[in-house]
Image (cartoon, rainbow, N blue to C red):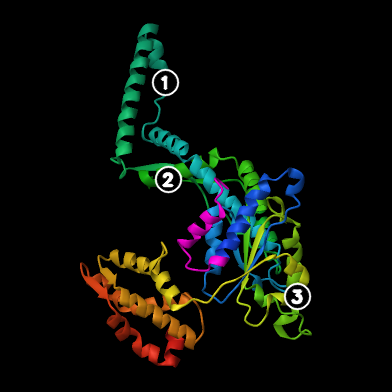
Amino acid sequence: MHQPLTPAEIVRELDKYVVGQREAKRMVAIALRNRWRRQQVPEHLRDEIAPKNIIMIGPTGVGKTEIARRLARLAQSPFLKIEASKFTEVGYVGRDVESMVRDLTELAVNMVRSEELEAVKLKAEEIAEEKLLDILLPPKRQQGDKEAALPEPEAMHNAQEQSRQADSTREKLRKLLKKGKLDDRYVEIDVPDRNVPMIEIFAGAGMEDMDYNLREMLGSMMPRRTKRRKVKIPEAREILVVEESQKLIDMDKVIKLAMERVEHSGIIFLDEIDKIAGRESGGRGPDVSREGVQRDLLPIVEGSTVTTKYGMVRTDHILFIASGAFHIAKPSDLIPELQGRFPIRVELTSLTREDFVRILKEPENALIVQYTALMETEDVKITFDGTAIEEIAELAFQVNSRTENIGARRLHTIMEKLLSEISFNAPDLKGQVIPITKEYVRDTLQEIIKDEDLSRYIL
């Protein structure tokens, strides 16, 4: 983490994207700040301080996932969202719980590699430019026999003159290259040949990583082949920049940094944890392995060592944020040991009409901002007046109350239906300004809203 944010600053940043849910934002802000605090305490205490894992309780579409995702971006932490219901108890067909730590490590390696590539990009561009100039103006071979026939001072003078001319031509080419005057010219370059034989390995359930590692190992045993391609200069530059960037970064350093980042600032968001909260049901149906999944999760959350292809990863200080609607099951239905590993409980509230109005207008990525920007690409301007926004919010609230409550996701379905006609005809409406009024919203959606069975399927 770079300059650490205070809890109040974290909440302010989250407010830009998530409406309401103040208590949840405060709790995650404290959990994130505690990570920084842990790094400041004396070393003998550091390993004793466990992360303050969180359970978010609330219906779907109220901002649980968005809070966790934005938190990870603020902390510049490796972040993995995964559904707890994907896992099964060891011995059953499905993913084993350790795979989420391996996935998080892979994400962290890619994240650090991207940062390192960005850091060396300027240097790589310089080297790529020199290579392009070498291709455009190959160095002349020494004309040995002719030069040998000339007296020594004259041969030296000729060599210097040729060198000056070559330098002058190279600089002229460099200027043309930078101005883009040579972009239509084709050059031949060597690129890695990706058409290597495909090796299919059949791995059993829960053995995805072994399958991947075997492929990677067998692929690396084959000699690296290249092929010559004729491409335009802009594409050649891109290929050379990527190639040189890969050479400039130290992958051992990347892996070391990524492992540290996973262990000290990784965040795993366990969605739908209520789906595995049911206790044993006597072996009936899908409940048979729910408690088993919890017992498999327990060592990961408590802190254990997981083997990944990059090395051993300790999970002691990974932050786990669990979430679930808990309509049927309750957090107390989780096994006691797992409950104890999630000391922070926070309940998210259902969204009101006023919340819907704010969601449509206030966030930086608000739906109205998104749809307005999409239509502007077709040179069509849509404007929403205040009463139209209130009407959309009211309709979303009504449909949520009468059918299934899917929170803010209902706004997406209503907005899509409301603007479908404009979206379809947008290429023919260039230059027009289309006002979206309360009457337009009612005329477009009222029939669907009135018919409860229809709204159940369409909205």
Residue beneath disc 3: 291
Residue 2 among magenta residues: yes
Above or below, comparing residue 441 to residue 228 in the picture: below
Using the image, tell me which numbered label, if any, was put on residue 314.
Answer: none
Q: Nearer the viewer, residue 200 or 429?
A: 429
Q: Residue at x 65, y 59 (%)?
A: 319
Residue beneath disc 2: 238
State the separation of the CA atoms marked 2 and 1. Answer: 32 Å
Q: From the viewer's perspective, is 457 left or right of 272?
A: left
Q: Residue furthest left?
A: 431
Above or below, comparing residue 125 to residue 313 in the picture: above
Quarter holding residue 103: bottom right
State the separation of the CA atoms marked 3 and 1. Answer: 78 Å
Residue 360 among magenta residues: no
Judged from the image, the secondary structure of the residue bearing numbered disc 2 is helix
Residue beneath disc 1: 142
Magenta part of the chain:
1-23
